[in-house]
Image: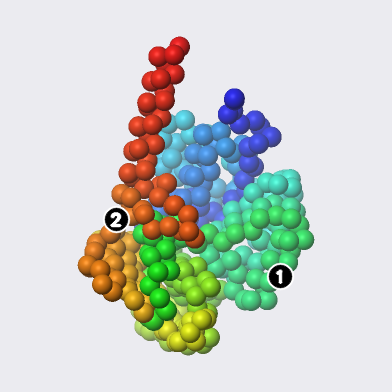
C-alpha cells in the first residue's frame, strides 16, 4: 500500500506573526534567546521537506522587515539544514506597513487550510476569529485570548464553522510534565502546588513593543503552569478564588510601565471531598542570565504523595506514602498510564524496541525476496 502524500492531502499553512517564536528575528537581528532560529517557520519548512505541508505563508504588520527576515532564515535554516525549501509568501509587501494585512493574507487561503498565530496577546481574538470565519483550522499561542467573553465567542465560532481551534500550551507535550500529571492522578486530594517560570531581564528588550501595554508576564508565562493545573486536576478539583500580587522596579527603570514578576494564589476545591488546596504561580521576566534561558519548575503535593519537576535541568523526583523516594526518568520508559492507557510510545526504551522489530521485519522481507 502506497504511503505517498498527494498534493490534496498536504496542508497549506499561514503563519501570523513574524517575531521571535516564528522566525527568531527581533529588532533587526537574531533573538538573544534559545529561539534565535525561530520555531514555527523552521517547523513548517521541515514539514514541507517531509511532504506534509505544501504552501507556506507569513503575515506581519511591517513589510519592510521581510528582506532581513529572509536573510536571517537563510543563514539559520537554509545554510544549516539540508533540503529546506524556504519559499514563503509574505504579507504585506516589502514596502508597506499594514496592521490589517492578515485579512488580505487570509483571503488567499481556502477552507481546511491552517493558521498558526504568534502575535501580541491582545491581537489573538480578532485574528483567530477572522481565520475561523474563513474556515481555517487555527492554533494560537497562549493565552488564546484575554477574557472569558472572547474565549466563549471563539468556541462558538469554531463550532459554527466546523473547524479545529487549539492553544499552543506546549508543556503538555513535555515528557516530564506529562508524566507528573499522570502520577498526580494517583496521589489523592490536591493539597499544594508551587510553580515558577522565568526568563532573563534582557528579554524585556524583545517584548518592549507590548510589555505592560497589551499584556503582562503572567499571561505570558504563568499561563503554562495554570494550564498544567487545569489539565491535571480536571475531574479532581476546581479553582474557586484567585488573588494576585506583583513585584516592580526593574522594568520601570528601563522605561516600561509593567510588573517585573506576578504571583497568583489560587484556592482549589477538591470535588469529591470538598477539601481545599492551594496553588501559587509565579512568573518573572527580570531574572539574571543563568545556565538556562527559562527556569521552569514546580512542586505538587497530594494527600498521599508529592512530585517535584525541574524541567530546565531535566529532573523529576517522586515521594509516595509507603514507597521509597525516587528520581524518575520518563524519557527512558514511561509506565504510568494516561487516562488508563499505555502512553510510553515516545520513551527511549519503547523506541529502541520498535526499531529492533522494524529492523527484524525488514531483514525478514529481504530474506523472502
Q: Position of residue 209 (x, y in %)?
A: 51, 68
Above/below status of 302 relative to 316? below
Answer few, some or many: residues within 10 Å of disc 2's Cα (few below 14, many 20 plus, some between 14 and 19): some
Question: Nearer the observer, disc 1 or disc 2?
Answer: 2
Q: Give me the residue at 70% from left, 47% from top.
A: 112
Query: What colour scheme does the image use?
Result: rainbow
Q: Give me the residue at 49% from left, 60% from top.
A: 339
Q: Quadrant of the C terminus?
A: top left
Above/below status of 290 relative to 369? below
Above/below status of 357 relative to 237? above
Identify which residue, 287 or 350, lies in the foreground.
Answer: 350
Tell me the quarter of the picture where residue 329 sits: bottom left
Residue furthest to the top in view is 369
| Mark toward the start of the polypeptide (1 vs 2) | 1
Answer few, some or many: residues within 10 Å of disc 1's Cα (few below 14, many 20 plus, some between 14 and 19): few
What separation in Å lies between label 1 and label 2 (alpha carbons)? 41 Å
Q: Give me the residue at 33% from left, 62% from top.
A: 311
* Disc marking residue 329: 2
Q: Position of residue 175 (x, y in %)?
A: 39, 56
Identify which residue, 149 or 285, lies in the foreground.
Answer: 149
- Count of numbered circles on the image: 2
Q: Position of residue 224 (x, y in %)?
A: 46, 68
Tell me the quarter of the picture where residue 182 sits: bottom left
State the residue position of label 1: 153
Q: Mark 1–mark 2 contact, CB under 8 Å?
A: no
Report whether residue 211 is seen: no
Which SS class for mark 1? helix
Which SS class for mark 2? loop
Identify which residue, 115 or 265, lies in the foreground.
Answer: 265
Amino acid at each position: 500500500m502506497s504511503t505517498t502524500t498527494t498534493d490534496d492531502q498536504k496542508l497549506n499553512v499561514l503563519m501570523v506573526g513574524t517575531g521571535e517564536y516564528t522566525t527568531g528575528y527581533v529588532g533587526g537581528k537574531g533573538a538573544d534567546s534559545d529561539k534565535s532560529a525561530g520555531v514555527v517557520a523552521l517547523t513548517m519548512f521541515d514539514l514541507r521537506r517531509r511532504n506534509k505541508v505544501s504552501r507556506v505563508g507569513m503575515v506581519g504588520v511591517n513589510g519592510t522587515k521581510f528582506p532581513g527576515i529572509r536573510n536571517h532564515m537563510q543563514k539559520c535554516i537554509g545554510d544549516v539544514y539540508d533540503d529546506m525549501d524556504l519559499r514563503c509568501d509574505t504579507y504585506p509587501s516589502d514596502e508597506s506597513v499594514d496592521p490589517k494585512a492578515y485579512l488580505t493574507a487570509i483571503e488567499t487561503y481556502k477552507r481546511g487550510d491552517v493558521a498558526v498565530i504568534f502575535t501580541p496577546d491582545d491581537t489573538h481574538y480578532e485574528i483567530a476569529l477572522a481565520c475561523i470565519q474563513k474556515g481555517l483550522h487555527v492554533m494560537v499561542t497562549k493565552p488564546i485570548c484575554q477574557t472569558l467573553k472572547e474565549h466563549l465567542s471563539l468556541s462558538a465560532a469554531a463550532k459554527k464553522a466546523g473547524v479545529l481551534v487549539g492553544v499552543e500550551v506546549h508543556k503538555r507535550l513535555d515528557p516530564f510534565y506529562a508524566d507528573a500529571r499522570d502520577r498526580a492522578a494517583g496521589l489523592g486530594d490536591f493539597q499544594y502546588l508551587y510553580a515558577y517560570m522565568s526568563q532573563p531581564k534582557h528579554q524585556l528588550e524583545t517584548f518592549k513593543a507590548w510589555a505592560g501595554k497589551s499584556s503582562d508576564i503572567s499571561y505570558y508565562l504563568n499561563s503554562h503552569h495554570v494550564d498544567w493545573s487545569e489539565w491535571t486536576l480536571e475531574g479532581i478539583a476546581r479553582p474557586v478564588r484567585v488573588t494576585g500580587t506583583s513585584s516592580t522596579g526593574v522594568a520601570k527603570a528601563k522605561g516600561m510601565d509593567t510588573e517585573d514578576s506576578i504571583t497568583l494564589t489560587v484556592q482549589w476545591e477538591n470535588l469529591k471531598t470538598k477539601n481545599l488546596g492551594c496553588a501559587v504561580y509565579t512568573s518573572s521576566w527580570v531574572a539574571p542570565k543563568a545556565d538556562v534561558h527559562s527556569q521552569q519548575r514546580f512542586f505538587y503535593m497530594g494527600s498521599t504523595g508529592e512530585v517535584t519537576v525541574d524541567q530546565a535541568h531535566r529532573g523529576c523526583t517522586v515521594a509516595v506514602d509507603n514507597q521509597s523516594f525516587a528520581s524518575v526518568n520518563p524519557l527512558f520508559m514511561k509506565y504510568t498510564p494516561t487516562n488508563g492507557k499505555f502512553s510510553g510510545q515516545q520513551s527511549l526504551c519503547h523506541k529502541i524496541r520498535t526499531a529492533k522489530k522494524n529492523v527484524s521485519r525488514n531483514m525478514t522481507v529481504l530474506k523472502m525476496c
